Image (cartoon, grey):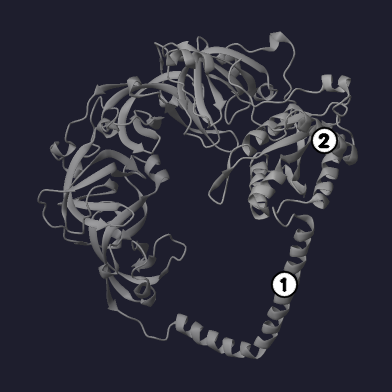
């Protein structure tokens, strides 16, 4: 049979993951008229209705499938004639779905992180179709309104940056209204960086960026592959071959340009910080930017820079800048200025020199920052890191310093916007390459307020020595009290946990089961109890020894814990017998699903002393209230179901029914539930 035929017959995924209990009722409505049959009818549900787990049946085309983008689940967008909707899938297993695959799915509605989605999906591949032939052109404003959520849209823009991860690729696209990210699965052997500076028309599913309150705070696109990317204008083969432009001409008026292309500028380095901040100067013109690649350069080097002109904080800069050692540029000499001249705004990003008095340090700043005064003007100077920390603290307040650095303006946005448009600075910071850019012109007397404070502090310290023994004694008492508290906690843990597997024992289980029964009775919810017994464990002990048997029990305990939720309890009753408590189940069938998961997990080989050992388990399953309304009756019901599971061949589970009896009574045997199997793909 051809491979496509095998997929057609076998590719059916039944997804029913256990989820935490919710206050909302998730039972499916029984009325056939309540079934939603179009993508748009699901997506446009109010949140209150989507939370009711309404049944969904769709026949649609896959427009995007990505099992890697979200650690919680796989991302699947499907599209029919009404529109698109998001479908939640487990991250594993990875399904052989491709863009254009035609699928038939059933599931239920869920609120989703932003808009309603389809959850708990049963998926069947019908065949291969094609992606939607047409897509609505959307602007960034329309996408940010949320009206195009999940829709198949097309956006035109210029690629500014490409970010690659092992599984995904992200294109940062600049449009005339702003930037957005377009995400796709990474295809091997594709040179995505060749798209930088290309003007493209891209098609994909619009998707929101949201916060924890389900509020939309941004938008991005998911596009299936480069087949949905049409290059309208290709970038130049070598961006450094573009003729360099003067820094003074960046962001000048240019009609009919919506997204400026990448430019090439040339200058001499005046500032280089380890975090990527770079400033260059070209004659009397200068520019600062964050760089993303290129060789290591030092202050004074002549370099070429390519990047996209943009504005940050009312200051021109280059975005996604890349550097290369380049052509000759005249050396940049610092310009002697006063604080008043810097406030005029004509020296932004330029290398300047100023004399100022040190008045303090900003200890809250991310980088070492000096507070300075020149005349009546206050400003600051920042260093790139901590290598000069000792010298930074050794400078005395009141020292007269000569500082050489890059003038960085902070613009008063309100005053700038409210007036004729000319830049209105409200503060200045000098960016320094190192402490070598600071020269001490005059140091004040040693006896400063700081030193006086140190002398006073020393006197207080000597006075406090007389009381030190009180604090030492108090510390000893606290340590002894803490030791007694820790000892009590260890004794309590030992009394409630099994020494071999560190699982809860019967004492702790009885306490948690009693609480779970009270909650189930009060809220009329489901409660599951699984009695697990290792099949043929005596043979393992006899053949491999008791030490190997202990390791097998520990491995089984670990697999049981891995198959349940964090709110469930796995306890060891003794020997090779375990109990699993499943409180707050939405439906009784979830207990059977977890039992099937445990049977499959434990049956995998266990490596003991470089030997593969296989064991199986038999499980008795009972749920409240069918298995009883108290602890004793539920344990008896689980024990009876376990006995029947053993009689039916082991390596499986048996669900208790109220009219069930021991094997040997023919009427009860005929009513017992047949041996459970793992879910099988297919209808």
Where disc 2 sits, the SS reads helix
Which quadrant of the figure has residue 533? top right
Using a 10 Å C-alpha cutoff, classify the residue at mark 2 as few (fewer than 14 neighbours), some (14 to 19) or many (20 or more): many
In the displayed structure image, the side of residue 673 where residue 71 appears, left or right: left
Q: Is residue 318 left or right of residue 480?
A: left
What percent of the width, then of the height, locates residue 2? 42, 13
> In the drawing, does residue 337 fall left or right of residue 112?
left
Q: Residue furthest front?
A: 543
For the residue pair 12 and 206, the one nearer the viewer reads as 12
- Could you say which is closer to the camera, residue 430 or residue 33? 33
Quadrant of the snapshot with the N terminus: top left
What mark, if any, has residue 37 been given in the picture? none
Q: How many marks?
A: 2
Residue 84 in percent (x, y) is at: 51, 17
Q: Nearer the viewer, mark 1 or mark 2?
A: 2
Tag 1's secondary structure?
A: helix
Would you say residue 442 is visible in this rendering?
yes
- Foreground residue among 227 and 304: 227
User: Residue at (70%, 85%) from the top-left corner?
Assistant: 470
Q: Name which of mark 1 and mark 2 comes first in the sequence.
A: 1
Q: Is residue 592 above or below residue 137?
A: below
Q: Residue at x 27, y 22 (%)?
A: 231
Quarter of the image with the C terminus is top right
Q: Is residue 284 visible?
A: no
Residue 450 vs 287, above or below: the answer is below
Q: Residue at x 39, y 74 (%)?
A: 393
Depicted 84 relative to depicted 252: above or below: above
Question: Which residue, given by chain and number where applicable, does mark 1 sit on?
Answer: 483
Residue on which disc 2 sits:
638
- The reply, left or right, for residue 609 in relation to residue 621 is left
Nearer-the-camera pick, 156 or 332: 156
Q: Position of residue 302 (x, y in %)?
A: 15, 53
């Amino acid at each position: 049979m051809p491979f496509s035929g095998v997929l057609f017959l076998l590719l059916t995924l039944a997804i029913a993951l256990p989820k935490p209990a919710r206050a909302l009722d998730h039972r499916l409505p029984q009325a056939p008229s309540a079934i939603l049959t179009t993508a748009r009818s699901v997506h446009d549900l109010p949140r209150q209705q989507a939370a009711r787990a309404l049944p969904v049946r769709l026949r649609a085309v896959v427009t995007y499938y990505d099992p890697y983008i979200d650690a919680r689940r796989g991302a699947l967008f499907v599209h029919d004639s009404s529109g698109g909707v998001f479908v939640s899938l487990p991250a594993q297993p990875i399904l052989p779905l491709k863009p254009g695959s035609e699928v038939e799915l059933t599931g239920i509605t869920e609120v989703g992180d932003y808009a309603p989605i389809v959850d708990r999906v049963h998926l069947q591949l019908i065949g291969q179709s094609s992606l939607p032939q047409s897509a609505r052109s959307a602007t960034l404003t329309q996408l940010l309104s949320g009206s195009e959520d999940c829709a198949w849209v097309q956006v035109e823009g210029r690629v500014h940056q490409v970010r690659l991860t092992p599984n995904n690729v992200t294109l940062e696209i600049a449009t005339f209204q702003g930037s957005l990210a377009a995400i796709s699965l990474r295809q091997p052997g594709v040179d995505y960086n060749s798209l930088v500076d290309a003007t493209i028309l891209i098609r994909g599913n619009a998707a929101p960026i949201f916060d924890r309150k389900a509020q939309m705070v941004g938008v991005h696109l998911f596009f299936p592959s480069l087949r949905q990317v049409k290059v309208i204008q290709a970038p130049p083969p070598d961006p450094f071959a573009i003729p360099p432009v003067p820094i003074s001409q960046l962001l000048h008026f240019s009609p009919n340009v919506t997204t400026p292309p990448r430019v090439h500028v040339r200058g001499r380095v005046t500032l280089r910080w380890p975090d990527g901040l770079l400033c260059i100067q070209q004659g009397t013109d200068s520019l600062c930017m964050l760089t993303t690649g290129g060789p290591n350069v030092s202050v004074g080097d002549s370099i070429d820079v390519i990047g996209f002109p943009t504005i940050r904080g009312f200051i021109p800069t280059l975005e996604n800048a890349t550097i290369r050692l380049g052509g000759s540029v005249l050396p940049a000499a610092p310009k002697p200025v006063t604080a008043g001249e810097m406030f005029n705004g004509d020296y932004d990003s330029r290398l300047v020199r100023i004399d100022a008095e040190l008045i303090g340090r900003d200890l809250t700043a991310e980088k070492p920052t000096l507070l300075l005064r020149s005349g009546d003007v206050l400003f600051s100077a920042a260093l790139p890191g901590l290598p000069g920390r000792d010298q930074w603290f050794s400078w005395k307040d009141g020292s007269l310093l000569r500082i050489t650095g890059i003038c960085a303006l902070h613009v008063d946005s309100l005053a700038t916007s409210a007036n004729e448009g000319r830049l209105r600075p409200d503060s200045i910071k000098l960016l320094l390459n190192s402490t070598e850019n600071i020269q001490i012109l005059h140091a004040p007397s040693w006896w400063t307020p700081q030193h006086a404070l140190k002398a006073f502090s020393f006197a207080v310290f000597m006075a406090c020595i007389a009381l030190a023994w009180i604090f030492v004694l108090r510390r000893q008492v606290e340590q002894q009290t803490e030791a007694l508290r820790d000892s009590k906690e260890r004794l309590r843990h030992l009394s409630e946990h099994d020494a071999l597997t560190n699982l809860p024992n019967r004492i702790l289980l009885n306490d948690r089961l009693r609480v779970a029964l009270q909650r189930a009775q009060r809220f009329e919810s489901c409660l599951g109890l699984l009695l697990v017994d290792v099949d043929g464990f005596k043979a393992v002990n006899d053949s491999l020894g008791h030490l190997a048997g202990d390791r097998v029990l520990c491995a089984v305990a670990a697999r049981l814990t891995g198959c349940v939720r964090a709110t469930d309890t796995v306890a060891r009753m003794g020997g090779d017998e375990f109990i699993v408590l499943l409180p707050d189940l939405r439906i009784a069938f979830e207990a059977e699903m977890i039992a099937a998961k445990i049977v499959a997990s434990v049956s995998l080989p266990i490596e003991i002393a470089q030997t593969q050992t296989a064991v199986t388990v038999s499980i008795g399953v009972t749920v409240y209230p069918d298995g009883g309304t108290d602890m004793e009756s539920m344990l008896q019901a689980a024990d009876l179901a376990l006995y029947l599971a053993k009689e039916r061949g082991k390596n499986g589970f048996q669900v208790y029914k109220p009219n069930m009896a021991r094997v040997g009574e023919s009427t009860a045997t005929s009513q017992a539930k047949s041996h459970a199997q793992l879910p099988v793909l297919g209808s």
